[in-house]
Amino acid sequence: MAIDKFLVEASHIMMFARSVGDDNPIYHDEEYANKTDLGGIIAPPTFAQSSAQFDPNYFLRPKIGGEGWFGSGKDASGAKPSSSSGSGESGGGGAAMGLHAEQHFEYHLPVKAGDVLSATTKPGNTWEKESKRAGKLKFSESVTEYRNQNGDLVITATGVGVQTERAVDS
Amino acid sequence: MLKESEIKIGDKHTTTLVEDLKRTQIVQYAGASGDYNPLHTDEIFTTQVAGYPSVFAHGMLSMGLTGTMLTNYVGDGALKKYGVRFTNQVWPGDTLKSTATIVDIREQDGERVVDLQIETTNQNDVAVITGNATAKIES
């Protein structure tokens, strides 16, 4: 997966912060944020995950005029997801093809509203494990590097996705 | 930012992240993050096709909620590292509590930093997230 342009916008940061229950003014109040040492609105620590919005082939977004969507409509499930039609990777993780097992972020520089990031993802390790709750588990790691408009590395994100044999028993 | 003179190894910071998690908040997260996997928002698909008892939260929503606790504790722009394992699913109706525990205070790349162990649990005291973080502190 590669993302050429991940536009970090203040309104997107505001919506993302709301969704994770964060009313810190550094994420929505420009006047307040400008007076802090950071000098403006910054992105919350897990915001890089929303780079999925900027991945044209992102697997877990219905495509306009696309092949259909596997969620419910008239029937409980629509089209089967086709793994060949998308990258199968989320922005910061490798969870799109199954469940998300782990996620790690390393922060090198603050991500600020107005930044234009690019991201490249490389596959990492893969391994298997047996589990009582979900059968055979297939783990796969992906490492995404986010760079800003100056070419500086801002975030390294490592995601671990897991494909389960069956739904996880709760 | 945390001040070194005001913290010590073993200090704990606990907050409630969400009470009675609503499906609507999961929808909000789907919209903001761009992860529209029906397992998180489509009750019919999730129960009838995928075989789960109900929709459940994105792991990244739990990590995001836990991140709110973390940045409220260590300050804005202080995090150097933040990583988690998703140990159990989070369901609508769950109430989540999260604790950060200081496990080390040390020097890294010429800066003073604190290492934190993180655990987020549900109303049954089952861990849904375990993880760790490193943040800059004021010496």
Image (cartoon, coloured by chain):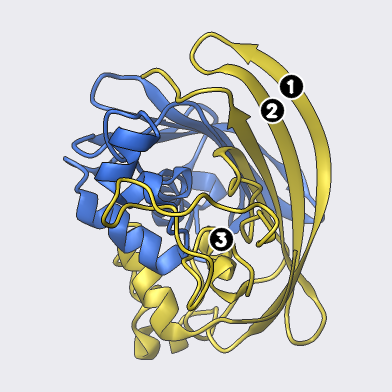
Q: Position of residue B74 (x, y in %)?
A: 48, 53
- Which labelled disc corresponds to residue A49? 3
Q: How many numbered tags mark residues here? A: 3
Q: Quadrant of residue A160?
A: top right
Circle 2 residues within 10 Å: few <14, some 14–19, many ≥20:
some
Asked whether residue B116 is in view, the answer is no
The chain under label 3 reads: A
Label 2 sits on what residue type? Lys
Helix, strand or loop at label 3? It is helix
Say if A8 sits above or below A130 in the image: below
User: Would residue A17 appear left or right of A2 to someone viewing this image?
Assistant: left
Which of the image's four quarters has the C terminus of chain A?
Answer: top left
- Please tell me which residue is depicted at 48% across the width and 14% down the height of the picture: A133
- C-alpha distance separating marks 2 and 1: 5 Å
Q: Do the dots labelled 2 and 3 sit on one chain?
A: yes
Helix, strand or loop at label 2? It is strand
Circle 3 residues within 10 Å: few <14, some 14–19, many ≥20:
many
Say whether marks 2 and 1 touch (CB < 8 Å).
yes
Where does label 2 land, which residue? A138
User: Would residue A16 appear left or right of B74 to someone viewing this image?
Assistant: left
User: Would residue A59 appear left or right of B90 to someone viewing this image?
Assistant: right
Q: Position of residue B96 (x, y in %)?
A: 29, 36
Picture colour for chain B: blue
Picture colour for chain A: yellow
- Which labelled disc corresponds to residue B123? none
Residue nearer the viewer, B7 or A5: A5
Where does label 1 land, which residue? A128
Q: Position of residue B63 (x, y in %)?
A: 46, 46
Circle 1 residues within 10 Å: few <14, some 14–19, many ≥20:
few
Residue nearer the viewer, B18 or B75: B18
- Please tell me which residue is depicted at 45% across the width and 56% down the height of the picture: B71
